[in-house]
Image (cartoon, grey):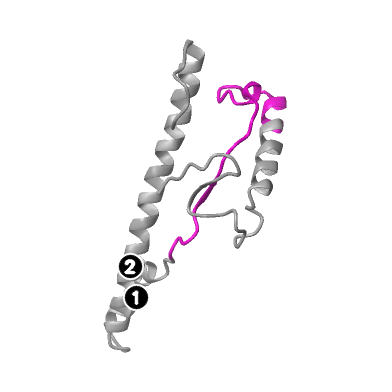
Amino acid sequence: MNAPIPRTMPDVLQRMTQLQYTSRLQVDKQFFDKIDRFVDLMEKVDQSLPAGSSIRKDPTYTAMAAHRKINHFNVVTSSLPPGLSNASDFSRTSIEARIQAGYDDAMAQGIGAVSSPGLRFGVTSATSGTDLS
């Protein structure tokens, strides 16, 4: 969110794409928090219902009770070189390089193990320090 002001039209388009994805992450976090509140409420309702209640057989109740909390949300930041960070480049070479860079970044940032000390809620990066919370 603290990138320099774009100076050219291609830079503006690139920055616009970056902001769209960052904005989407904020929306996802809010949605996950909402689901967590529903799960908490469903647990209270489930504890309050008598064992033989007909509500327990209701398909909507059953579907809602099956939801689980989203208790780990991390975003792996990218260290792509400028030549590979153009979101409108779908060439085979660019896509393969992005896949490899994403894998390398994920492993370097500890995404391979959920208990990794480098992981925390929001964005994980050895260099960024940016947080979505």
Residue 77 is tagged as: none
Q: Which residues are magenta?
A: 69-96
**Quick check: is 71 in the magenta stretch?**
yes
54 left or right of 1?
Answer: left
- Vertical relation: 58 (above or below) 53: above
11 part of magenta stretch: no
Choose between 63 and 90: the one closer to the eye: 90
Circle 1 Cα neighbour tier, 10 Å, few/some/many (<14 / 14–19 / ≥20): few
Going by the numbered disc 2, the residue's amino acid type is Thr
Q: Mark number for residue 60? A: 2
Depth check, mark 2 against mark 1: the one in front is 1
Disc 1 marks a residue whose amino acid type is: Glu
Chief secondary structure of the magenta span? loop
Kind of element beneath mark 2: helix
The correct choice, above or below, for 35 with respect to 25 in the image is below
Question: Where residue 33 appears, x then y in whole percent?
Answer: 36, 57
Q: In the picture, which quadrant includes the N terminus?
A: top left
Whole-percent x, y for residue 13 in the image: 47, 19
- CB contact under 8 Å: marks 2 and 1: no
Toward the viewer: 126 or 95? 126
Image quarter of residue 62: bottom left
In-image side of 57 versus 112 (left or right): left
Residue at (60, 36) in percent of width and height: 78
Front position in the image: 57 or 106: 106
- Residue that carries the numbered disc 1 in the rendered image: 43
Local secondary structure at mark 1: helix
Residue 55 in the image: above or below residue 37: below
